[in-house]
Image: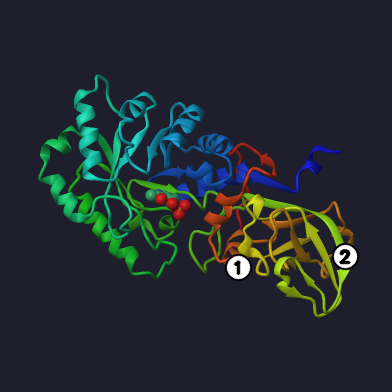
Amino acid sequence: MKSSERYGGRLTINLDAVGANYRLLKARGAPAECAAAVKADAYGLGMARVAPALWNAGCRTFFIATLDEGLALRALLPDAGIYMLNGLPPDEETTLLEYRLSPVLNTLGQIEAWAAFARSAESTLPPAAIHIDTGMNRLGLPADEVDALFDRPDLLENCPFDLVMSHLACAEDRSNPMNHGQCEKFEALTKRFPGKHASLSNSAGVFLGAPFHHDLTRVGISVYGGAPILNEPNPMAEVVHLQGRIVQTRFVDSPMTVGYGATHSFKKRTRLATVALGYGDGYIRSAGNQAYGCIGGVRVPVVGRVSMDLITLDVTAADPALSEPGNFVDLIGHGADMDDIARRAGTISYELLTNLGSRYERIYIGDGSLAGETRP
Ligand SMILES: Cc1ncc(COP(=O)(O)O)c(C=O)c1O
């Protein structure tokens, strides 16, 4: 048995496309520095391979969510700037100092703790970021707490930080008035922090234009091929190719049904293919009766519910020679657009990617240092 036949699915991740996407995002946001979000195992694609590829593409600053992710990233990239989005974990100041991890300080309490640690520490701390809230109401200091911070000049003096950041709530919707509202609030607040770098934009924000770029952009989903802006052509190169192996085919006819719950009934003679991956592989269950795959570029709908290890597709329209058992169906990429599949499954590409489990045969192409292809 060939080793690839041990797996129901094959996940190919093109690191040269990751590199090309990073360079495109950096160019679109220039002269701002471009940092990459590699949290959640680089959006499910494998931080151990993706982060070094981004480094090869020129990325020097990274954002992760948790301390655990920060420690893993530090082992991969000894010289990178690493910011931890989820804040300063209690009693972990010395770990952050040892591994030079920069906390994103989300509350006055965290600012106090970092300043107190700076006073007592014998060496220079990695500079933190102060997160101010401009409308997301999730993390960061709201305007009144920024005022409270300025009532405590001792805190500001003693807290080593080099970045003031905020996060856009609706950036993927170009026409949403909240974008400019947040940008104006951010600019008013950052004026109070002269000499500090400012960062507001995620991937989508990069495409909202120069007023959103400031000193540092923080890009995630579009590095991985996701469309930055809703309902606009996707300029990013395709990174992810998910293929499922056909393990059985059969002809079915009216009045038969397929799968658990008998949720799809056949109206005519149909060629059905069973593919060896399911929600146990992260192919989300809500894709049942909604998503599609591609065989030789021909769309083949997912019919019936997604099972734990299997899905079924109507392959009547596909070339029979390409849809025999042993062949692959393209489930993300190569015609099965990641954002379209996510939308049909009632979710977003972020969730589609971070769900991809460890059950696939994983293949990495390139190392991020070559120019990948971008869509026209
Ligand atoms: C604070 C922050 N900045 C940047 C990003 C990257 O965003 P995106 O993947 O939309 O580019 C995220 C992702 O969730 C985030 O939470």
Q: Which label sits on residue 113?
A: none
Q: Residues within 10 Å of mark 1 (few under 14, many from 20)?
A: some
Q: Would you say 83 lies left or right of 11 here?
A: left
* Residue occupying the point 17% across, 48% down: 192
Closer to the camera in the image, 189 or 27: 189
Which quadrant of the structure image shows residue 84?
top left
Name the image quarter holding the N terminus. top right
The image shows residue 249 at horizontal and vertical percentages of 86, 61
As displayed, is residue 177 above or below residue 69? below
What kind of residue is marked 2? Arg
Q: Would you say 175 lies left or right of 105 here?
A: right
Which quadrant of the structure image shows residue 128?
top left
Closer to the camera in the image, 179 or 135: 135
- Say whether residue 147 is visible: yes
Q: Secondary structure at mark 1?
A: helix
Please tell me whether mark 2 or mark 1 is closer to you in this view: 2
Earlier sequence position, callout 2 versus callout 1: 2
Q: CA distance from mark 2 to mark 1?
A: 26 Å
Residue that numbered label 1 is attached to:
344
As displayed, is residue 374 above or below residue 319? above
* Residue occupying the point 76% across, 63% down: 312
- Say whether residue 30 is visible: no
